[in-house]
Image (spheres, helix red, strand yellow):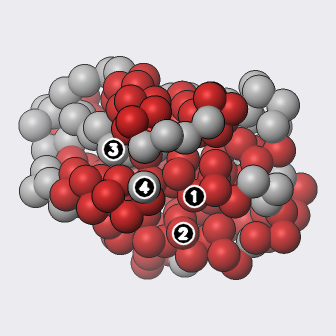
Amino acid sequence: MLEAIRQQLTQRYEEPHRAYHGMAHIEALLQGQLAHRDLIRDHQAVMLAIWFHDAVYDTHQHDNEERSALLAGDMLAQAGASPALIDSVQRKVRATHRHEWTDGDTDTAVFLDLDLGILAASPDAYDRYAGQVAQEYNWVPEQAYKAGRAKVLQAFVDRPQVYFTPALQALWEDQARANLQREIATLTA
């Protein structure tokens, strides 16, 4: 089951319009899952959420997370996954729309934190990430992109915390806030 799904999703993550949201991102999240495995209860659900969360990625659309969740449901049902597993994966994928943890599942919190782990990268790695995201939106006029990106980043800064999991918050919160504020300053200069 998982090998066939992995092969199909790998093709999606190798689409040429993906600069950041490609296989390197998936591999980084899978490594993060391994590194923080002690925080996760259902490793299969988190692993599948990692694989499916950006399966549909089109910067011209606003429903990528929903479409990715539906794709996960279809593919996992065809593979014989249980309804409970499908529901868990779909909830996690949908939560990436605004990166809000509302389902009470601590695995969703860890998954969301892993997805935003890049925000706490070294300044050089963060700048590469920011440049790759800008590349994915290169069709948007520069000033509109800067305003939109600054608004998205400011929403993270305005939260009481960027990360939901206490262990990951302790590791990453300060560096993430510094990177976010630095990019916002650049975008709004």
Which label number is shown at residue 47?
Answer: 1
Residue picked out by circle 3 = 55
Which label number is shown at residue 1?
Answer: 4
Q: Horizontally, is 45 left or right of 56 in the view?
A: right
Residue 7, percent across and down?
A: 27, 61
Cα separation between marks 3 and 2: 15 Å
| Mark 1 surroundings within 10 Å by alpha-carbon count, few (fewer than 14), some (14 through 19), many (20 or more) | some
Residue picked out by circle 2 = 30
The amino acid marked with disc number 1 is Met
Q: Horizontally, is 29 left or right of 138 in the view?
A: right
Q: Horizontally, is 161 left or right of 1 in the view?
A: right
Asked whether the beta carbons under mark 1 and mark 2 sit within 8 Å of each other, the answer is: yes
User: What secondary structure is marked by label 4?
Assistant: loop
The amino acid marked with disc number 3 is Ala
User: What secondary structure is marked by label 3?
Assistant: loop
Is 172 drawn above or below residue 82 in the view shown? below
Considering only order in the chain, which callout, 4 or 1, is on the residue closer to the N terminus?
4
Residue drawn at the location 44% of the way across and 59% of the way down: 2
The amino acid marked with disc number 4 is Met
User: What secondary structure is marked by label 2?
Assistant: helix
